């Protein structure tokens, strides 16, 4: 990811990630549609008791039900099957570029900017640090959007709880607590994700500031890779490809400056 001349960017698993992005985009749209309908239906039921509107309300309820089922099925397929398979290809591509293995039929080119580094433990650490650096900055950029989304969804479902359960003195407070915690969970996980990435980056900077024996470098490389992949696996908010494309050039320049500062070569 640098301004130096290098091979054209090619990811053998890019098609998989594009499909993953489309599925997650459909999930997001489905969730927003459910949220909107969850407000419209109770409001219609509360204020419009005219029989002329009963058919409209029934139709909206059917549509809401279908979208909910569709969202659930798509979420299960995407997060249980599609994402793990795609992530496994990404890890294979990482290893191919870092240690010279041939897990994928075609190599990853023009993605990492560390071709000058010899294959082996050090390249694992440098490639992993580059991944962590980009992921950290993308996650930070996503934070405001996640805050807004979670606040809006929380308000939406509290409104739903009010209209749907206001006559039930037990269900209302329980449902409000559960829904609030549900949407706050994603936000809390994302903040924790950013903090863990920042901590991991600090460990990378310390690593580049020290000199180790070959065996120690190998051990550190394995630990860094496991720490990063574990942190990534527990992330609840998928990284935004749009934000990656927006920040890529700027972050690439910053990464090249970091390599010069720590004499990574």
Image (spheres, rainbow, N blue to C red):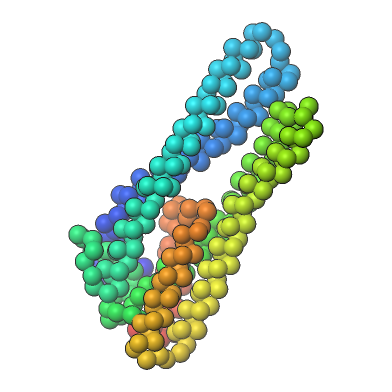
From this viewpoint, is residue 126 visible? Answer: no
Q: Along the line of sight, which residue is nearer the eye, 250 or 78?
A: 78
Residue 171 drawn above or below residue 101: above
Task: Give the residue at x 24% y 73%.
Answer: 100
Task: Give the residue at x 37% y 57%.
Answer: 87
Task: Give the residue at x 23% y 63%.
Answer: 103
Please indicate whether residue 241 sits to the left or right of residue 190 in the image. left
Tell me the quarter of the picture where residue 112 sits: bottom left
User: In the displayed image of the protein, which residue is found farthest to the front?
Assistant: 170
Residue 58 drawn above or below residue 92: above
At which x and y percent is residue 219? 39, 81
Q: Quadrant of the N terminus?
A: bottom left
Tell me the quarter of the picture where residue 141 sits: bottom right
From this viewpoint, is residue 221 visible? Answer: yes
At which x and y percent is residue 74? 43, 38
Task: Give the residue at x 71% y 15%.
Answer: 48
Q: How many marks?
A: 0
Q: Along the line of sight, which residue is nearer the eye, 152 or 158?
A: 158
Residue 33 drawn above or below residue 98: above
Q: Along the line of sight, which residue is nearer the eye, 9 or 101?
A: 101
Please indicate whether residue 53 sits to the left or right of residue 27 in the image. right
At which x and y percent is residue 225? 41, 71
At which x and y percent is residue 173? 76, 39
């Amino acid at each position: 990811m640098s301004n130096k001349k290098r091979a054209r960017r090619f990811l053998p698993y890019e098609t998989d990630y594009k499909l993953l992005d489309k599925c997650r985009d459909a999930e997001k749209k489905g969730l927003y549609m459910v949220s909107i309908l969850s407000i419209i239906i109770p409001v219609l039921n509360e204020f419009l008791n005219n029989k002329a509107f009963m058919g409209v309300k029934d139709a909206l309820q059917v549509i809401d039900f279908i979208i909910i089922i569709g969202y659930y099925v798509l979420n299960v397929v995407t997060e249980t099957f599609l994402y793990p398979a795609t992530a496994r290809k990404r890890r294979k591509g990482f290893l191919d570029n870092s240690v010279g293995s041939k897990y994928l039929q075609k190599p990853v080119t023009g993605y990492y900017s560390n071709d000058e580094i010899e294959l082996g433990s050090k390249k694992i650490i440098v490639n992993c640090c580059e991944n962590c650096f980009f992921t950290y900055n993308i996650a930070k950029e996503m934070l405001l959007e996640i805050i807004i989304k979670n606040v809006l969804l929380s308000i939406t479902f509290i409104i739903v709880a009010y209209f749907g359960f206001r006559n039930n003195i037990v269900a209302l407070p329980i449902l409000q607590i559960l829904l609030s915690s549900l949407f706050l969970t994603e936000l809390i996980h994302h903040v924790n994700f950013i903090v863990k990435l920042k901590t991991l980056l600090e460990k990378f900077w310390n690593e580049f500031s020290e000199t180790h024996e070959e065996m120690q470098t190998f051990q550190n490389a394995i630990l860094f890779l496991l720490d990063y992949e574990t942190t990534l696996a527990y992330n609840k908010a998928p990284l935004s490809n749009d934000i990656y494309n927006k920040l890529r050039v700027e972050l690439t320049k910053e990464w090249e400056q970091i390599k010069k500062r720590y004499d990574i070569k």
